[in-house]
Amino acid sequence: MIVSKQNLQVVEVTKADKQIPVLDCVNILDDGTTVGGNGKCFIAVSPVPDVIKEKVAKVYGNSKSSCVNVSSGTINEVLKNIPADRQYNGMLEHAEIESTNGNNIKFVLYDGARKRNIDGKVNPASYPPFENLFKRALTNKQNIQIVLNAKRLLPMLETIVKCSNDSGDFSPMYIEFTSEGEMIVRMQNPKTQQRVVGLMLPYKGIEGKWMENNNWEERLQNGYFNSGDQHLDSNSDRVFNSIDKSNKSRVPVVENSKERCIIQGKQKTGNRQLARIMHDKECKCGLYHIATDGIFEWCSGKKGCGHFERIKK
């Protein structure tokens, strides 16, 4: 059986578990699918495609193997010895499971010059029924608020990225949620076309209580902080300088002023200390956004059209 480096990366989410020792293994199915998990999240990687398997088999061979649980120590040893292959377009970043004998297994690696065998251990215990978890999750998807363990989530996402092995800037990750709060993450390796599917279970009970927005988050969500925020530093940064990428119009610096309305040359301005840029509203000149202090609005550009208008009496 041929497995790729990406297949074996699922070892990153395995863990030593005294109650369920087989969780410290990578489950390799007879079709080449690999599964790793820790009881709270599972990642499955699809088999090496036949078109690649045929090419790799000319070097490694491709003997059949039954479903087996390989210890994480063995998998890590194999990964450490799989060469980084740029010369043959990744063909050497594979291994063949040549034989299993009792609780032993043999991986065959090739570095372009010679073959190397790595012997390891397997666990004969039954692997947790991950199929039921994936089936339930993948057929029961909908939007929902969930609470996840960040220290488990990050290793899972990092492992999925490793399995997808996408080094380009365009690296899409597809995320969905089920009605039970499970998180489903999917990616595809652009070179081998192998799919990676990750599943993570949420916190339950009091740990899963949703964190409601506080006042600061509400204001942040609404896009501004009003003048009644006594706890904010009055000298905090009030400089707005952003780029509207959709129309490339520039929003220049908005300066501070304690006065409600002042004259700068022939241009009227509102209270710059309370000002905010309205990123969804352009000035009629079409070059800058509208700025407002809640009472007046004006063209935010120093060299803009000079628009100034009272909006609140």
Image (spheres, helix red, strand yellow):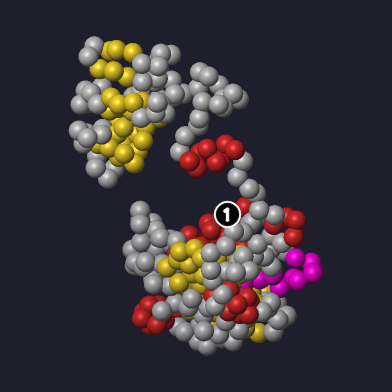
SS for tag 1? Answer: helix
Report the front residue among 73 and 294.
Answer: 294
Q: Residues within 10 Å of mark 1 (few under 14, many from 20)?
A: few
Number of residue marks? 1
- The residue at the point 50 percent across, 30 percent down is 226
Task: Pinpoint residue 93: horizontal percent, then vertical percent.
Answer: 44, 68
* 187 shown above or below 98: above
Is 275 on the left or on the right of 290, as rendered? right
Task: Pinpoint residue 227: horizontal percent, then vertical percent.
Answer: 51, 26
Q: Is residue 233 visible?
A: yes
- The residue at the point 59 percent across, 87 percent down is 66
Residue reaching furthest to the right:
19
Report the front residue among 279 and 171.
Answer: 279
* 252 shown above or below 67: above
Q: Is residue 95 visible?
A: no
The kind of residue on which mark 1 rests is: Leu
- The residue at the point 48 percent across, 67 percent down is 186
Task: Pinpoint residue 125: horizontal percent, then vertical percent.
Answer: 73, 80
- The residue at the point 31 percent across, 39 percent down is 281
Residue reaching furthest to the front:
313
Q: Which residues are magenta?
A: 17-26
Residue under numbered circle 1: 154
Image quadrant in which you'd find residue 56: bottom left
Task: Pinpoint residue 98: horizontal percent, then vertical percent.
Answer: 54, 82
Is 289 on the left or on the right of 8, as rendered? left
